[in-house]
Amino acid sequence: GRPGTAQRRDEQSRERLKVCVFSKHLQWLDWEGMAQTSAEIGFDGIDLTVRNGGHVLPERVEQDLPKAAEAIRKAGLALPMVTAGIVDTRTPHAESILRTLNALGIPRYRWGGFRYLDSKSIPERLEELKRETAALAEMNRKYKACSMYHTHSGTEVGASIWDLWLILKDLDPAWTGVNYDIGHATIEGGLGGWIHSFRLISPWMRGVAIKDFTWAKNAKGEWRPQWCPLGEGMVNLRQFLAMLKEAGFAGPVQMHFEYPLGGADAGAKTLTTEKSQVIAAMRRDLATLRARLREAGLA
């Protein structure tokens, strides 16, 4: 082709974000089934559960993660990350998980679950968590792995994002970063909060999770966030993806399916609905995301 075509093609392939399915929603399938089904639906990769009740159990990581990784890669899918139950360096099997990730060339894992304590003020607790995270960063560096703190909504550390920034601001984002969940960020700051939290934490953003919700009353008449299919809720996907593009975000993007889906939403091992319904829902949400990614110039 004309001069510059290869370079342009290279830029395009670099910008195309990989969309992974969170394997929690496919716990009703074994490794091969989960990989095949994900490929058939049209995902680019897997965010694999390596935790209690997950596709790989932490105590079996050295034996089982290589087999699961092989099944995923054999299906033509990427394995850019796992979701581990690691909270800090003291978490059982933390080091063997990192060692195995390193051996298999999996560069990232999801970590988190810090809590505030009634016995300590917020500033005191954050100082303590800075020390724990610095120790985890050292362990990550040793095994060339980046931990991404998954953000939730509610009372746990990281929900409001500024607290996470205080913990991470002096650490190298190559080894400790953030997995920014736009659903939870919108619950915490629906009007402008998520925009500011994105801007604050984007230098540490190593992954993003996609889901949608609306506020609704539950059976007791209390207002609660309720997860829903992508595009039907309050998440401003267009603005969020435009901001990802502007920030030069490189992925991975993980899709979550937390709305009622026959148990697949909750990581059930057996479904209470037809598997074709689960697959159709995943396909529909993926098509919604792909359309928005194309609009944003990220697909």
Image (cartoon, helix red, strand yellow):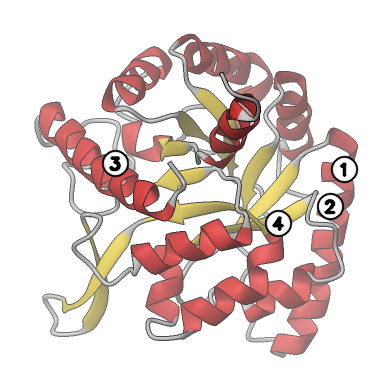
Give the percent coordinates (x, y) of residue 81: 59, 36
Residue 205 on image: x %, y %: 64, 58
| Distance of label 4 from label 1 (alpha carbons) | 13 Å
Q: Amino acid at mark 2?
A: Ala
Comes first in the chain, label 2 or label 3: 2
Query: Circle 2 is placed at which residue position?
Result: 137
The residue that mark 4 highlights is 177
Residue 123 placement: quadrant? bottom right
Marks 1 and 3 close (CB-CB < 8 Å): no
Q: Is residue 277 left or right of residue 39?
A: left
How far apart marks 2 and 3 lie (CA) works out to 33 Å
Q: CA distance from mark 1 to mark 3?
A: 34 Å
**What amino acid is found at the position of numbered circle 3 in the picture?**
Leu
How far apart, in angstroms, are the residues tagged by discs 4 and 3?
A: 25 Å
Q: In the rendered structure, which disc, 4 or 1, sits on the residue that comes first in sequence?
A: 1
- Indicate the position of residue 17 as horizontal and vertical percent values: 50, 41
- Horizontal side of 204 relative to 294 (left or right) equals right
Q: Is residue 88 something one can see in this rendering?
A: no
Crowding near the residue tagged with mark 1, few <14, some 14–19, many ≥20 C-alpha atoms within 10 Å: some
Q: Which mark is residue 286?
A: 3
- For badge 1, the amino acid type reads Arg
Element class at badge 2: helix
Marked residue nearer the N-terminal end (1 or 3): 1
Residue beneath the point at 30% across and 21% down: 37
In the image, residue 176 sits, relative to residue 99, either above or below, namely: below
Q: Quadrant of residue 162?
A: bottom right
Determine whether 289 is above or below 64 in the image.
below
Task: Name the residue tied to disc 1.
Answer: 141
